[in-house]
Image (tube, coloured by chain):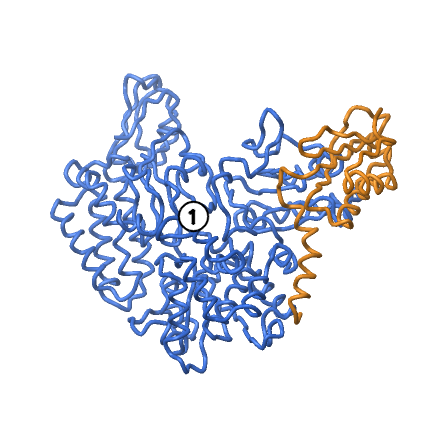
Amino acid sequence: MYRSHVLVCGGTGCTSSGSAQIVEKLESEIAKNGLSDEVQVVKTGCFGLCALGPIMIIYPEGTFYSMVKVDDIPEIVSEHLLKGRIVSRLVYDETVTDKGIKSLNDTAFYKKQHRVALRNCGVINPENIEEYIGTGGYEALGKVLTEMTPEEVIQTILDSGLRGRGGGGFPTGMKWKLARNIVPDADQKYVCCNADEGDPGAFMDRSVLEGDPHVVLEAMAIAGYAIGASQGYIYVRAEYPIAVKRLEIAINQAREYGLLGKDIFGTGFDFDIGLRLGAGAFVCGEETALMTSIEGNRGEPRPRPPFPAEKGLFGKPTILNNVETYANIPQIIVNGADWFASMGTEKSKGTKVFALGGKIKNTGLVEIPMGTKLRTIIEEIGGGIPNGKKFKAAQTGGPSGGCIPAEHYDIEIDYDNLIAIGSMMGSGGLIVMDEDNCMVDIAKFFLAFTVDESCGKCTPCRIGTKRLYELLDKVTKGQGTLEDLDKIEDLCYYIKNNSLCGLGQTAPNPVLSTLRYFKDEYIAHVVDKTCPAGVCKDLLKYVIDKDKCKGCTLCAKQCPAGAIEGSVKNPHTIDQSKCIKCGACMEKCKFGAISKK
Amino acid sequence: MKSLEELRAIREKMQGQVGLRDEDDNVTRVVVGMATCGIAAGARPVLNAFVEGVAEKGIGDKVMVTQTGCIGMCKYEPIVEIMEPGKDKVTYIKMTAEKAKEVIDRHLIRGQIVSDYTIS
């Protein structure tokens, strides 16, 4: 029996800031102080507050230590664990109040969150199946197998209103129902999990796999029972090594405990799961390409219909759900459809995980009920935009989505509201932009990604996105014309309407939505040949204000191109023909004499 | 594992463990003074007796055992404070593992303050 638990985040964010070394040091310090029998060190999944990593929570006090360094460990062990004195200089400052330390759940970051899919992330040790069982794990599978018929399971999921969390938002129960009924005499069916999270800036699936891998296994087994499948596959990208390792451990443990394999719970139901690693092609997140890749072929999409529910993996009826979708299933079974449907908006039930990134204080993962306002997510949970800058737009849905401009800052986030304003939920990446971001440049960035990732099978996507990129590049270089803007728009619709799969069909979205809300910025690039945000290098120049310049020569010394001329104590000037616009001079100037225009 | 009963048995065994990580304001807090003075006077066995006793009696969902620094009355260590929601704090002094078991039985389970051990 341990009197104290030290939870250290072992997610990708904190691992890269050194949490593994912290665990090592903790264990050696705890042993040195003779506390090994009293204090347990647990490596958990992601807590969500990645910006403050490495993160450590000590229970039962619930003390939240942030940005912990290896050198801090002896003090934490000898003060907190041995003597019970909280090391206040290391405590997350938001939890420190006049009356002492408040609970993490009362901080702005966690207070408005509602954790369903992430409920165990940062709470349990993902490499120990018994901890998952201790928080109610595999109870849903037991309930389904012993008390419910497959039809009842499907009806529960339908009634809950759960929609696919991978981006499309298709009702999950409907998918299951189709897969169960469409080919009545199928000899084999498959349950697949899409863990090929590829959107730049999205990392919620990774966090679930790393922090709570068993929830995905349990949900897949439930799905297998519901549609009548005995085999599942998880398609996970090889670039997620921690997730892959924990999934392997989890699958082996589940088999050992008889929760995967033959005759589960003695009910005669068989289900097993295999792991397939993706080699990193974005298109393999598309369902038909993903299944083609599992079959061992080159990951390319194929036209639909037939839909996977009818003819999927190896030509058999297949369901494919996203990691986060699965993470909701066991709790819907245990708590009931009504419980789940009581959260969220009319057509979007439950919660959604967002990966906050870009110009925001609390970079990390948040889970909020559907219908939460964008403003609440950014200003309250996210802690606002750093350096007092103004909110300009938020990009949701990654390269398939669009931007939400300031005029829609109060939008209630759900599937349909986002589509209505030309964006989409996507997998849940939320990138915040402030006034220093150029929207044309952003559109170009996302397009560069799709140009790279287009699989090349169909022409509209392969060539269309490339030509679209070239047009945008022309605009950012100040060589565009107003006719080019019309051409851009036409080409966008052409690509959307003619591409084979979701990748091409949604690739122009970032361009269309920035054109819709920030046309003035495009026009500024084309007509005035300026970049209002000061990002596009070809359109800006650095100048020295000769009244403010003291002639200290610091900038001239700093300039890597030798573009700054002038003598000591006399105003300097920048030779525009030599200037490479790196901005190094502006950073160095102590008098604020250099500005970009 | 072949039955739901086995699953529930694991769950119950683990709940005492992971339950420590719940944060609930409505629990009784048992706070053991674990500063240098407390440790020297034998607070560690007292703390462990409380942790084990609470788990054994199955009252872990209502009682949280934690530690604190020096309370300031070093000569009375080991000191244990019991704070029940909505009630006055009770301070036990010169505690031992045996006394801890008695306090669990009488105070934490039956709600009677063991006045022999409290500070006068």
The residue depicted at 60 percent of the width and 49 percent of the height is: A123
| Image quadrant where one finds the C terminus of chain A | top left
Percent x, y for residue B33? 78, 32
- Residue, x 35% and y 61% (percent of image)? A170
Closer to the camera in the image, A164 or B109? B109
10 Å crowding of disc 1: few (<14), some (14-19), many (20+): many
Name the colour assigned to chain B in the rendering.
orange
Q: Relative to residue A305, is residue B41 drawn left or right?
A: right
What residue sits right under mark 1 in the picture?
A: A354
In terms of depth relative to the viewer, which is nearer, A111 or A553?
A111
| Residue shown at the point (32%, 58%) measured from the top left | A452
Q: Position of residue A122 (x, y in %)?
A: 57, 48
Vertical comparison of A317 with A469: above or below:
below
Residue at mark 1: chain: A
In this image, A100 relative to A187: left or right? Answer: right
**Is residue A434 positioned above or below A267 on the image?**
above
Amino acid type assigned to the residue bearing label 1 in the image: Phe
- Residue at image coords 37%, 37%: A375
- A145, A234: nearer the viewer: A145
Q: Is residue A39 left or right of residue A333?
A: right
Q: Colour of chain A?
A: blue
